[in-house]
Amino acid sequence: MAVRCAMSTNYAVKLVSRRGHVYKSFASLCDGIAADLRARSAILEGEIVCLDRREHSLLNELLYHRGEPCFYAFDLLWLEGETCGGCP
């Protein structure tokens, strides 16, 4: 599930779909992201996935909330007030 992860200046994380839907059912995942990020504010793009032991994605586990969701970030768009579009 492709999402943007937005962390505001009060360390609140939101997972937002490309169409603007805020996913409220991943509160524990948001808490984990907030604890792991070492930034006051950031926007990342990535995927929410559930994985098996071989790290293969299990879509049904994610859709039916049977597995442990993880956030895989693949792009940092904004960090601490600066755009990261040209960053390596």
Image: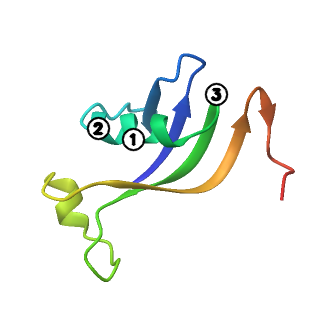
Left or right relative to 40: residue 68: left
Secondary structure beneath disc 2?
helix
The x, y position of residue 78, in whole percent, is 72, 37
Question: Image quadrant of residue 49?
Answer: bottom left
Residue 32's disc is 1
Contact between labelled residues 1 and 2, with CB atoms less than 8 Å apart:
yes
Residue 41's disc is 3
The x, y position of residue 86, in whole percent, is 87, 50
Snapshot colouring:
rainbow
Q: Amino acid at mark 2?
A: Ser
Q: Which residue is mark 2?
A: 28
Residue 60 position (above or below residue 27):
below
Mark 2 to mark 1 CA distance (whole Å): 6 Å
Q: Amino acid at mark 1?
A: Gly
Secondary structure beneath disc 3?
loop
Instruction: Check disc 2: other Cα within 10 Å, few if <14, some if 14-19, many if 20+.
Output: few
Instruction: Check disc 3: other Cα within 10 Å, few if <14, some if 14-19, many if 20+.
Output: many
Sequence order check, earlier mark of 3 and 1: 1
Quarter of the image for the C terminus: give it.
bottom right
Q: Amino acid at mark 3?
A: Ser
Left or right relative to 17: residue 75: right
Residue drawn at x 37%, y 34% is 31
Residue drawn at x 57%, y 22% is 8
Residue 53 position (above or below residue 28):
below
